[in-house]
Image: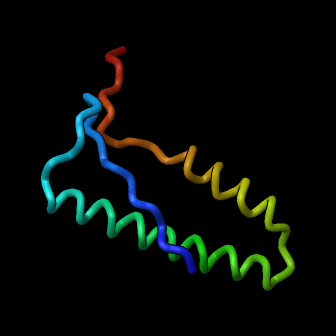
Amino acid sequence: MSKLPLPTWLTKGGEPVSCLDKIKVLNENLEEIRQLAQDALEDAVLMGCDEVQFRRVMRELAASLENPYRKKPKP
């Protein structure tokens, strides 16, 4: 298995995140998500599912994630 290249995490203002504890948590979360996604891909392929479709579904899943902290416009 290849190691996931870790990004430089950025703030909303485009500056690198400087807190090492935050970076550690973000990197650990990304590694866990990668491993879970890898396991799911392997399961899908072993069960005869189309890899291209699986990857599309995973992209759609990522795109559907909602930010619960985003300020909503006032009605």
- Name the image quarter holding residue 37: bottom right
Task: Work out whether 17 lies above or below 72.
Answer: below
Q: Position of residue 65 (x, y in %)?
A: 49, 47
Q: Position of residue 38 (x, y in %)?
A: 60, 75
Foreground: 51 or 61?
51
Task: Work out whether 17 lies above or below 37.
Answer: above
Residue farthest top in this picture:
75
Tell me which residue sits at (25%, 64%) in the image. 25
Tell me which residue sits at (51%, 76%) in the image. 35
Tell me which residue sits at (83%, 73%) in the image. 49
Q: Position of residue 48 (x, y in %)?
A: 86, 79
Task: Work out whether 55 lies above or below 18.
Answer: below
Left or right of 53 in this view: 27: left
Snapshot colouring: rainbow
Q: Quadrant of the C terminus?
A: top left
Left or right of 70 in this view: 44: right
Q: Quadrant of the N terminus?
A: bottom right
Left or right of 5 in this view: 46: right
Tell me which residue sits at (45%, 43%) in the image. 66
Foreground: 3 or 59?
3
Residue farthest bottom in this picture:
46
Foreground: 4 or 55?
4
Count of picture labels: 0
Q: Position of residue 56 (x, y in %)?
A: 73, 54
Left or right of 50 in this view: 58: left
